[in-house]
Image (tube, rainbow, N blue to C red):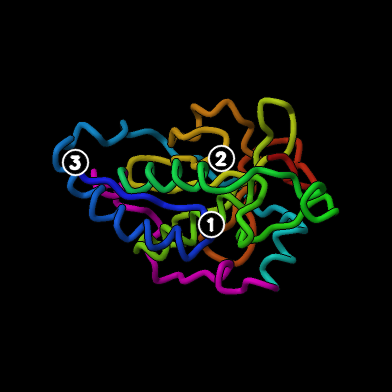
Amino acid sequence: MCSAGIVKAGIAGLFVGLVLLAGCAGAEAREQGVAALPAVSAGAVPIGAARPILAWTEFCRSYAAECALDPSEPARIALSPSVWSLVASVNRKVNRSLRAQTDQEHWGVPDRWDLAEDGVGDCEDFQLLKRRLLAEAGLPRRAMRMTVVIDEKGEGHAVLTLITDRGDYVLDNKTGAVMAWHETGYTFIKRESQDAVAWVSLGGVTSPVVTANR
């Protein structure tokens, strides 16, 4: 059986593991067959402009390439068994590799977005790192949108939405499972636009000021 270890050594170590993992994912998917793909479901529908999270705006000043949008990229990820296996594996590996800590505990501020370079982060940092790794593996960044939700505790939370040809799927540091957005139990508030460096509303009424939980 093919396996790959992603060690707790920051982004460089994770990316080395991801390169190995991509090859393993293809082999495993060929064994599993098309049945490994999730069922087709309807995606979330943006309904207009939304105000960005302030910490995201500050993040974009420091990490402009992470916020840049290329309109020539596909707006949807074509899900194949190998891509689905890769996505699920990256979600699990990053969740296991970073130590969860709130920004208040970590940095002494309510909300700060970064790439968890020191191996510590809260919800958005997990998802931003997953997106960077998946983009480096060849998935279109335009189809991977940071998303703000209200979680099961009624708190602001950040997840990564993958917009695919089989529906919208969510990567979350609270679970190793990649789930269809409507199966998470969250209230979806807003996400990054696919057409501009901006945000769009997903219909949720209550918009959190920060995404500050673990």
Asked if marks 3 and 1 touch (Cβ < 8 Å), the reply is no
Which residue has dot 3 on it? 1
Judge from the rendering whether residue 213 lies leftward or rightward of residue 116; answer left or right: right
Q: CA distance from mark 3 to mark 1?
A: 27 Å
Q: Amino acid at mark 1?
A: Leu
Label 3, residues with CA under 10 Å away: few <14, some 14-19, many ≥20: few
Judge from the rendering whether residue 93 lies leftward or rightward of residue 65; answer left or right: left
Q: Nearer the viewer, residue 60 or 48?
A: 60
Q: Amino acid at mark 2?
A: Asn
Q: CA distance from mark 2 to mark 3?
A: 27 Å
Q: Position of residue 154 (x, y in %)?
A: 74, 28
Judge from the rendering whether residue 139 lies leftward or rightward of residue 56; answer left or right: left
Which residue is located at x 65 percent, y 39 percent?
Answer: 149
Q: Amino acid at mark 3?
A: Met
Q: Earlier in the sequence, mark 3 or mark 1?
A: 3
Q: Quadrant of residue 62?
A: bottom right
Which residue has dot 2 on it? 173
Q: Nearer the viewer, residue 213 or 3?
A: 3
Front of the two marks 3 and 1: 3
Label 2, residues with CA under 10 Å away: few <14, some 14-19, many ≥20: many
Which residue is located at x 84 percent, y 54 percent?
Answer: 109
Q: CA distance from mark 1 to mark 2?
A: 11 Å
State the count of labels: 3
Which residue is located at x 41 percent, y 35 percent?
Answer: 42
Q: Earlier in the sequence, mark 1 or mark 2?
A: 1
**Mark 2, secondary structure of its residue:** loop
* Range of magenta residues: 62-84
Which residue has dot 1 on it? 129
**Mark 3, secondary structure of its residue:** loop
Quadrant of the snapshot with the C terminus: top right
